Image (tube, rainbow, N blue to C red):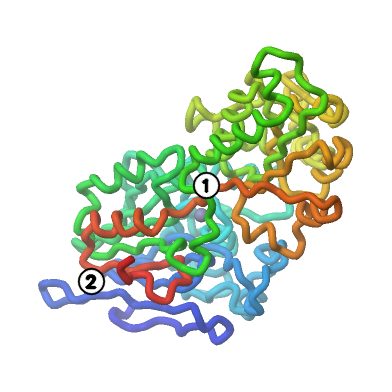
Amino acid sequence: MPRGRHRGVPSPSDPRATLFLGSDINHQGALTTHYIIHRGQHEIGGMCIEVDADDGTRILLDLGMPLTAPGGGDFPWDTPQRPTADLIAEGVLRDIPGVFPHDPTAPAVAAIILTHSHLDHYGLAHHAHPAIPVYGSEGTIAVLEVGRVFFPASALPADLRRLPLDETLRFGGLSVTAIPVDHAAPDSRALLIEADGQRLLYTGDLRAHGRTGFRFANMLSDERLRGVDWLLIEGTTLGSSGETHGLGREADVEEKLVELARSEGAKLAAEGKLVAAEGKLVAVVASGQNVDRLVSCYRAAKRSNRLLVIDPYQAYVLMKLAPLSKNIPQFTWDGVRVLFAPHQVELLKQAGKMDLVIEMRDAGKVSSDELAADPGRYLMCCRGSFGVTKVFDKVGPEKVDLVWSMWSGYWSRERCATRTWAKRHGLEPHFIHSGGHAWPDDLRRLASAMAAKHTVWVHTDSADPGAPA
Ligand SMILES: [Zn+2]
């Protein structure tokens, strides 16, 4: 690999993306570790960073799906599954040398390391040459593998491997250390890369205000990270979407949900009275992967004397993540019920998991008739799908207190089934959400604590992310 040469050019289809050669001259006057941001510096999504060592070892950090199509809208949902050559031709996938099967020099990359299980960080990794191992944390792999059951048409990387927590992985002249971070995807990691006596820290996505916010504090005091040569830090909230990420902390979400759930019929139950039939179903539309949010729902349900209702997909995600923490609610717990969604049950059956379906049924199946009979008894954490609106219809729109618990931008999307349903019935949702990305003050606190020789903002649409507040 020739050193010190720019490789590739920005794709004309996406002028905002920039390739960046972060090489530097070390004290001996030799060129040292390179990094190249293939995508995801001046946009939110499509993350892919390459780091190369002097000995020619190359690794990729994330290989994600861009989130915004060239025209400004969303990509069709099945875009990541389209042929590699088409995605390269359209500029959705950058043709990074030695990475994709059509390139005779592939596999020329030692590994792809994923920071977390969000589509904009992992979603195109399965296009890489199958001999390139793809590493992710235990939680990242668990979420990806849930996809095998519930999204069987979606390909996964052929060689998925676990990224160890307490040991450093070595690839030729490069080493990779995973640093646990707090984010809306479970078990997310920042990555510390060391090569040729230099250190590069890529934050991935992170925040200080989730249920594992202590991890952010741990980073601030982690001596291994202080004074790194390059800090590649996410800056999502510094850009135009900064105002749309909701409440300050995940704990605020729980409080708001409790307020809402108690203000309905369950208030009576909390006071030891009979559950009021006029109580409303609190329906929280959230991402099934957002475990913090599910914990908030579980706690809010408990505190308002309601039962938490989840779907089989959510129940399966939680079961797969159970090894990570004993605080992750399970369908076997008291106070948790499973509402069977027919197509999800069918997918579990097709995956040979009929035993699990039976287990879910026995542990706490609840029917939509039961929800309709006593909606004030339940807090449901659900998906924003058309099928869920059928459940709302059965309960009765006037008996549904709708909570949109995702990024507000998703609510405005053209194909939002929940919004279409709410509009039809003249209902306004409560927006109760707290985003997965650190607030500007926290980002600046982190950048200042790391005191990197070079700080590079990525994953942001801010024109000047480094500007002081
Ligand atoms: Zn993310």
SS class of the residue under badge 2? loop
**Number of marks in picture:** 2
Q: Which residue is drawn at 60% across and 66% down?
A: 67
Q: Which labelled disc corresponds to residue 32? A: 2
Q: How far from the left and from the top, in percent, is residue 45? A: 53, 65
Gap between marks 1 and 2, in whole Å?
A: 33 Å
Query: In front: 448, or 67?
Result: 448
Above or below: residue 138 compared with residue 322: below
Cβ at disc 1 under 8 Å from ligand 1 = yes
Please tell me in which quadrant of the rendered image residue 296 appears: top right
User: What amino acid type should be assigned to the residue bearing mark 2?
Assistant: Thr
Q: How far from the left and from the top, in percent, is residue 465? A: 37, 70
- The residue mark sitting in front, 1 or 2, is 1
Q: How far from the left and from the top, in percent, is residue 41? A: 44, 71
Pick whichever of labels 1 and 2 is earlier in the sequence. Answer: 2
Please tell me in which quadrant of the rendered image residue 102 appears: bottom right
Please tell me in which quadrant of the rendered image residue 65 appears: bottom right
| Horizontal side, residue 350 vs residue 221: left or right | right
Q: How far from the left and from the top, in percent, is residue 188? A: 45, 47
Residue beneath label 1, please? 185
Residue sticking out furthest to the left: 28
Question: The N terminus is located in which quarter?
Answer: bottom left
Q: How crowded is mark 2: few (under 14 residues within 10 Å), some or many (20 or more)?
A: many
Q: Which residue is drawn at 79% across and 25% down?
A: 366
- Can see residue 172? no
Q: How crowded is mark 1: few (under 14 residues within 10 Å), some or many (20 or more)?
A: many
- Can see residue 149? yes
